[in-house]
Amino acid sequence: MTSASVSASAVSVFEDAVGALEGGHAVAFPSGMAAVSAVLDLVARDGAVVAPSGAYSGTRQLLADLAAHGRLRCTLVDVTDTRAVLGAVALSGAALLWAESPTNPMMGVADLAALAAVREGGARYVVDNTFATPIVQQPLSLGADLVVHSATKLLSGHSDVVLGVVVARDEPVAATLRAARRDRGATPSPSHAFLARRGLRTLPLRFERASDTAAVMAERLGAHACVERVLYPGFGTMLSFLVHGGAAAADRFCASVRVAVPATSLGGVETLVERRARYPLEVEAGVPANLVRVSVGVEGVDDLWADFEAALSSARRLSGSAGST
Ligand SMILES: *Cc1c(COP(=O)(O)O)cnc(C)c1O
């Protein structure tokens, strides 16, 4: 076997595994954004796209850039409001509906099966399933045409990979994506595909552990005096919460954790916390200044809670001394 065939097989072994999990034909890309970009390339020139106002910020940025260059038109909607989404798709004659559920970081839940009605009007229906993973939902079985993942996140699970994947219901669409990948030179890294495939072996275990912990953390945070509100969809490994004391208290919380790690990204074995409104694009999307997004890892729940409690008391001392709410 030549090294080229070994390399090619690392990618196709990963694709076969994700294709089996999502129930379609998988095509890997060098990053989640490369996968997003390849799907948006399927839209004809000046075609209309409807996407969630709470979509992943990188996706919103790309859509805004493409719209600014006259490549496509884009309407942002509240994806949890099915009637609003269907209305926007009909009104714009959309070629593509982009959905995400739960949304990031507000944790809104869309009715993915109901949104599949857009296919009757000829729109292609795409779901970014990065947050939920096929453990929670398989969008192709709910009527989607395409599923997108940042495999950088939960699928790989160890914060050491950058990789994306698109899963198509129909093989001809997968073939189109493969040809575009070749032509654009968007070749995924075999070593990252190998690591992602290895990570996939423990996806159910990691997901179950982190989900159980997330449920406990959501409940405890909800009962904590320093917490204004918890946003938790009731499943999965992601949650957000609003800290009393504004942005400064949320920043203090993130700077004070010792078990969790203050960082962007999500879906790794370590719990990550981030005040999302530090990014202008998130402020634009209406993300509260005092919101902390939590990607729950696989640590012991009591270690993690003790860490959060200590960091919340640091945040409270700050909000107390600043005299804010
Ligand atoms: C991170 C992320 C992406 C982009 O993936 P990269 O691998 O970082 O390029 C796309 N969608 C969602 C929901 C994400 O969280």
Image (cartoon, rainbow, N blue to C red):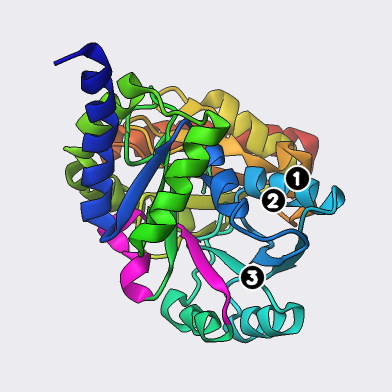
**Could you tell me residue 69's position as x and y percent?**
85, 47
First to last magenta residue range: 122-142
- Disc 1 to disc 2, how far (Cα)? 8 Å
Residue 125 is inside the magenta segment: yes
Task: Kindly indicate the quadrant of the structure image that contains residue 70.
Answer: bottom right
- Disc 3 to disc 2, how far (Cα)? 17 Å
Please tell me how crowded label 1 is: few (under 14), some (14-19), or many (20+) other residues with Cα within 10 Å: some
Looking at the image, residue 95 lies above or below residue 82? above
Which residue in the protein does label 1 denote? Answer: 281
Task: Kindly indicate the quadrant of the structure image that contains residue 278.
Answer: top right
Q: Pointer 1 and pointer 2: residues touching (CB < 8 Å)?
A: yes
Query: Which residue corresponds to the image point at 58% horizontal and 58% vertical from the top-left?
Result: 106
Amino acid under disc 3:
Ala
- Disc 1 to disc 3, how far (Cα)? 25 Å
Which residue in the protein does label 2 denote? Answer: 60
Q: Which mark's residue is nearer the viewer, 1 or 2? A: 2
